[in-house]
Amino acid sequence: MKAFGPVPSRRLGRSLGINHIPPKVCTYSCIYCQLGRTIRMQSNRSVFYKPEDVVRDVEEKVVKAREKNEHIDYLTFVPDGEPTLDLNLGREIELLKPLGISTAVISNASLMWQEDVRNDLLAADWVSLKVDAVTESLWRRVNRPHGALNYEAVFKGMKEFAEVFEGELATETMLIKGINDGVDEAEMVADFLADLTPDKVYVAIPTRPPAETSVKPADERAINRAYQIFEEKLKHVEYLIGYEGDAFAFTGNIEEDLLSITSVHPMREEGVNTLLSKAGSDWSCVERLIKEHRLLELEYQGKKFYMRKLPSIER
Ligand code: SF4
C-alpha cells in the first residue's frame, strides 16, 4: 500500500499520507533522520511506481475514509525518502485533483534547482521546504547531501520556487545540539527564510531516534533562542517539538492548556498571567508545573519565557 491514514497532523489537520518512494531513497542522509541512514543516495529523478497505482491506492483509502465519515484535510506526499525524486510527482498531483482534496508535499528542497521539480510542486496546495542550515559546511554536516548537489543551486532554487508558488509555503528547521543551534546560524537561517516569505516557519527538533546515535536535540534554551531570533524577522513561527497530538486542544483545564500552548510557542510572563486570570487561576499553577518538570522558565534578552519541557527520545 502506498497510502496510509488519515492520521492527525498538527501542520495539516487530518492527513492521508502517500508513500510513493521505496525505502529509503533520498538525496540527503541527514544525521537526525528517523528512518536511519539513507540506503540509496540518489540525485536523479526516476520512476518508482506507476502513477496510476499510486493514485488507485490513494483513491481506495479516500473511499474507505469517506464511508466511515472520516474527514481528510490533505493528501500528503511524505514518503520514506525525498518525494521530488519521483519523476511522476507532478502527474500524480494532477491525477489526484478530481478527489477534491488539497495536496501537500514535505520536501527536503534539495532538487528545487531543477525547473521540472519546481513546476511539479507548483501544482500542490501546501509545500514544506527543509532549511536546517544555510552555511555550506553546516548544510553538509547536517544533511550530508548527495555529492552531485550544488550548495548554491539548492538555495537559489528555493528562492525561485518561493517567488512563484501561490500555495501555502512552510519551512522546517531541525535544530541539533551543538551543531546548528547557535546564534549566528539562527540569524543567517532567519535572513534566508525572510527572503522566502513563508506562510509558516517551523522550528523542530528530532523527536524519534536519529540515524546517528551521537545526535541530540537542541535544548529548550537553544530552541527558545532560535524562536526569538526567527520571530524578529518572520511571521508565524511555531515549534515542532514532539507534541503533535494535543497542541492547541483547549480543554478548559488551565494546566493542560498552558502545556498545550507552550508546546507550540513560548509564552511571555504577561501572556501566562493573562491566561491564568481568564481561567480564574494563579501563578501557583505555573510553579507546580515547573516543579513537576513539565514546564520550563527561560530567559532571553532579560525577558522570561515559558516553554513546555521537551519529551525524551525513546529508543
Ligand atoms: S531528507 Fe528526510 S528522508 Fe532524507 S535523510 Fe533527511 S530526514 Fe531522512
Image (tube, rainbow, N blue to C red):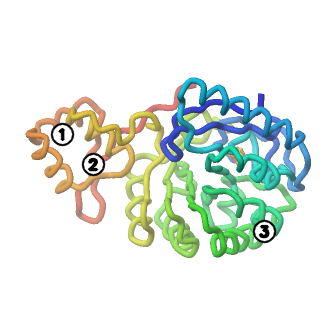
Q: Secondary structure at mark 2?
A: strand
Q: Is mark 2 within 8 Å of ligand 1?
A: no
Q: Earlier in the sequence, mark 1 or mark 3?
A: 3
**Can you tell which quarter of the image residue 2 is in?**
top right
Give residue 211's position: percent from left, percent from top. 68, 37
- 1 or 3: mark nearer the eye: 3
Marks 2 and 1 close (CB-CB < 8 Å): yes
Give residue 230's position: percent from left, percent from top. 44, 65
Q: Which residue is mark 2?
A: 306
**Can you tell which quarter of the image residue 127 is in?**
bottom right
Residue 228: tell me if it is visible.
Answer: yes
Instruction: Using the image, determine if residue 210 lies above or below residue 135.
Output: above
Q: Which residue is mark 1?
A: 286
User: Measuring 50% from the left and 42% from the top, which residue is drawn there?
Assistant: 13
Residue 24: tell me if it is visible.
Answer: no
Marks 3 and 2 close (CB-CB < 8 Å): no
Residue type, mark 3 in image: Trp
Left-right relation of 34 to 200: right
Q: Secondary structure at mark 3?
A: loop
Is the residue marked by circle 3 packed among few (<14), some (14-19), or many (20+) residues within 10 Å?
Answer: many
Q: Earlier in the sequence, mark 3 or mark 2?
A: 3
